[in-house]
Image (cartoon, rainbow, N blue to C red):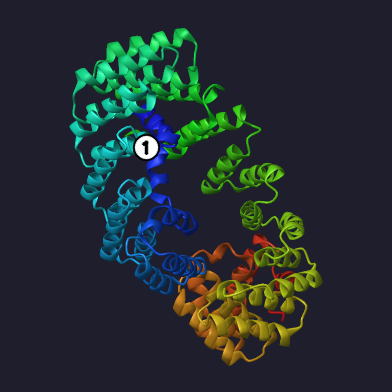
Amino acid sequence: MLLLRLFIYSFLQSKMYRNIFLILCISITYLFFISSCKTQNTATTSTNSHSHFDRVFAEAGRFVVIGEKSQAIDMYKQALEYNKKSAACYYQLARLYDELGEYNASVNAISKAKEFNPKNKWYRLFAVRIFLNRNNTKQAISEYNELLKIYPNDLESLTSLAILYTATMKFNDALKIYERIEKQIGITGEISLAKFEVLRSQRNQEKAYKTLNELINFYPLETRYSLILAEYYTENQELDKAKKLYDNLLNQKRNVGLVRLSLSSYYKATKDFDQSFEELKLAFADNSLELEQKVRILLTNMNSWTGNALSDEEIRVLLALLVEVHSNEPAVHKIYAEFLINEKRYKEAQTELLVVLQNEKNDFSYWEKLMSVDEILRDYSALYQHSQEALQLFPTQPTTYLFNGYGAFMINKNKEALTSLDAGLKLVVDNLELESQFYFYKGEVFNKEKRYSESDSAFEQCLKIFPNNTLVLNNYSYYLSLRKENLQKAEQMSKKSLELDSANINYLDTYAWILYCLAKYSDAKVFIEKAIRLGGNLDVNIVEHYGDILYKLGEKDEALRQWKLAQRLGTGSDFLKEKVEKGMLIE
């Protein structure tokens, strides 16, 4: 029942239903208990012992404040030597034992607190908390019943007890409590719906219908209660009654969006999925339906629309409606941006993220998403610009410097790139992966600047952190081969990258090229041809390298053919055009 789930969720956020959780989290400070102690126990203690008790009790409280639990326990025990019936001491001991996970000691201490101050509501509620933390619902229920003997009209305890009865499937007991509450405060939506849920669980349709109708009669202008009744009719296959009720509600023209939303569930139940989606669209297009409900419905049903999964196109339609109707709501653009990223529609995601950041400039996570999308799109000018803006807002975020350094590098601002990479590297703390990325890009920038010694050093530092980083192994070894330096080391690194990723055409090309530089032409041909078979025939550099290797092996006609193919694929080396024109290898 879609609407019932939504309303139960809403009611659980209301004050009455939150109280059980608030109750279980209440902790009375030790100052309160000093006061209670004075009023409770001074008649039975001497002035001197009373003074000693106060001093020790206060010292125990100080240990509590600074987090020294063991010392606090010792001091509370000392305080009990001056006042053996101090309920406040026992309460504090119970709380400390509970925090330390000493269940039995905590139960014993709170029992003593209740013994010496049996009417203290908060002691009993803390006892409930102890029992519930250990899933001892039976004892928690018993504790609530004892409390209600003292405070029979305590609404918070009554409501909490009814929830526990329901959770433990003691439905009749729960109903008795709800009826007791209604006698005290009259009919309310929260209690009536809770009672209806119990009756529904019992499959007591007659009383369930009666409860809903009483609620509707008491609140005739509350559309949501009528919708829950319509959904209950649908659940029980009383479809004509449900449809008649929906028609009446639409004629009233109140909360039309909510009615449409519930109607979509009705049509799903009747297997009319097209009409179900039409109603859902009408609900999303209606301003009267709260954005929070639309978002919840969309997120929870994006992958599973009650047995009839929404198609990607249907999700797009709903998201488009959401953006159209709630264009001023940042949350909508966030959801849409996330969806576009998941769909790999990066250009649209980039636009949507910019809309988000118009209103959410201080949300770093969306700057990070935007910069990642810029990188995926290879929109390096945008990456540089957006990272520059992010740096002004988040000068201590190292990833921003990494994006900025990379963006600057890709648009040939090498000096700026190095400045950003150096600044960001200083901000990295306990993140080896991020640290290695900084060194990698520094190596790339230094290589581009022909500062080879510094480039090699940066790559070495990167490999020191992650020796199996295949990208570093490949790039570093390739750069060495281009310089014809340290080729034996280059061969070892390239071979290692292939052992880790044997089907990567770029790694195969690098290894083939290093073998070529070592004059191992036959071996080079084996690896370059594997790269060609795996898709390298569409890469200008791989095809050109293939031609060079063939030429060295004396297959000059085939080498020329490969160079011509490379030329048609794009821009190769500076010598490619001359190789084609002269039909010979130029190096």
Count of numbered tags: 1
Residue occupying image coordinates x 49% and y 17%: 256
Q: Nearer the viewer, residue 497 or 535?
A: 497
Above or below — where is 437 with respect to 330? below
Residue 7: x percent and y percent? 40, 29
Element type at marker 1? helix
Compared across the picture, whether 229 is left or right of 346 comes to left
Residue at 36 percent across and 25 percent down: it is 265
Image quarter hosting the N terminus: top left
Image quadrant in which the C terminus is located = bottom right
Residue 386, quarter of picture: bottom right
Q: Is residue 299 left or right of residue 118?
A: right
Question: Can you identify the residue that label 1 sits on?
Answer: 156
Q: Amino acid at mark 1?
A: Glu
Position in image of residue 15 (x %, y %): 45, 35
Dot 1: few (<14), some (14–19), or many (≥20) neighbours within 10 Å?
Answer: some
Q: Nearer the viewer, residue 52 or 232?
A: 52
Residue 505 visible in this rendered orientation of the protein: yes
Q: Position of residue 211 (x, y in %)?
A: 28, 19
Residue at image point 50% right, 83% down: 495
Give percent across and percent down for residue 154: 35, 35
Q: Quadrant of residue 414?
A: bottom right
Q: Is residue 584 visible?
A: no
